[in-house]
């Protein structure tokens, strides 16, 4: 059971971080690890996040990385275990902070690329709506990543993002 993770490439666009770990900006490193297909890089970044002060962003990142790491596990039970643990972390943060667009974007990218067997596609429309509503309040770097992802997304489009821009400018 291989998970589709090509969408993680868009995260390489991030050059600024959203979290600090022991005084070191981890944003770029985190997103580089997430966009890679290198299990060692993902595990190293997970270790850094585990050592960091626990914040909602750190926990959401851990969740996304664990779901990515599931792709490298041997056997379906191990893959599912990692995916579920990551899902729990990300979902907990979304439940506590439902309007954080970055968390919704992380979940959308996972939902769109997760195998249907995992039954992780239920909140796609809700996530798209929150992303569209909050898109223009995002950091410019994050906006670029969302726009880039929208080009290949099944549910989020550049047209929808542009329409939101026109509505805001009126």
Image (cartoon, rainbow, N blue to C red):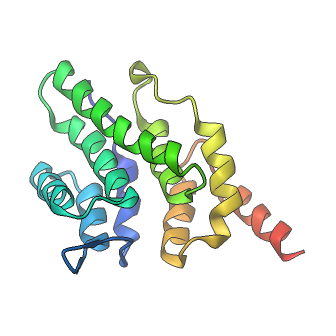
* Left or right placement of residue 22 versus residue 18 in this view: left
- Is residue 83 depicted above or below 11 in this figure? above
The quarter of the picture where residue 99 lies is: bottom right
Q: Position of residue 135 (x, y in %)?
A: 64, 64
Depth check, front residue: 13 or 135: 135
* Left or right placement of residue 159 versus residue 3 in this view: right
The structure residue drawn at horizontal position 65% and vertical position 41%, both measured from the top left corner, is 126
Q: Is residue 157 visible?
A: no
The quarter of the picture where residue 5 lies is: top left
The structure residue drawn at horizontal position 17% and vertical position 25%, both measured from the top left corner, is 78
* Left or right placement of residue 20 versus residue 7 in this view: left
Quadrant assignment for the C terminus: bottom right
Q: Is residue 122 visible?
A: yes
- Is residue 30 depicted above or below 15 in this figure? above
Residue located farthest toward the right when viewing the structure as drawn: 170
Q: Position of residue 137 (x, y in %)?
A: 64, 71
Depth check, front residue: 11 or 102: 102
Please tell me how many numbered marks the rendered image carries.
0
The structure residue drawn at horizontal position 41% and vertical position 61%, both measured from the top left corner, is 10
- Is residue 148 depicted above or below 20 in this figure? above
Q: Position of residue 87 (x, y in %)?
A: 37, 36
* Left or right placement of residue 79 versus residue 162 in this view: left
Q: Position of residue 48 (x, y in %)?
A: 16, 62
Depth check, front residue: 63 or 8: 63
The structure residue drawn at horizontal position 32% and vertical position 59%, both measured from the top left corner, is 58
Quadrant assignment for the N terminus: top left
């Amino acid at each position: 059971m291989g998970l589709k993770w090509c969408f993680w490439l868009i995260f390489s666009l991030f050059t600024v971080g959203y979290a600090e770990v022991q005084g070191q900006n981890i944003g770029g490193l985190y997103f580089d690890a997430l966009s890679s297909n290198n299990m060692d890089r993902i595990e190293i970044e997970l270790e850094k996040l585990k050592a960091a002060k626990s914040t909602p962003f750190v926990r959401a990142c851990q969740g996304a990385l664990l779901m990515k790491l599931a792709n490298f596990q041997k056997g379906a039970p191990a893959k599912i275990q990692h995916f579920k643990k990551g899902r729990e972390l990300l979902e907990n943060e979304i439940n506590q902070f439902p309007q954080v667009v970055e968390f919704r974007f992380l979940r959308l990218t996972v939902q769109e690329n997760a195998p249907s067997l995992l039954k992780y596609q239920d909140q796609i429309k809700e996530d798209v709506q929150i992303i569209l509503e909050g898109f223009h309040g995002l950091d410019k770097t994050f906006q670029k990543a969302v726009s880039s992802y929208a080009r290949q997304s099944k549910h989020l489009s550049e047209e929808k993002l542009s329409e939101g821009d026109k509505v805001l400018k009126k």
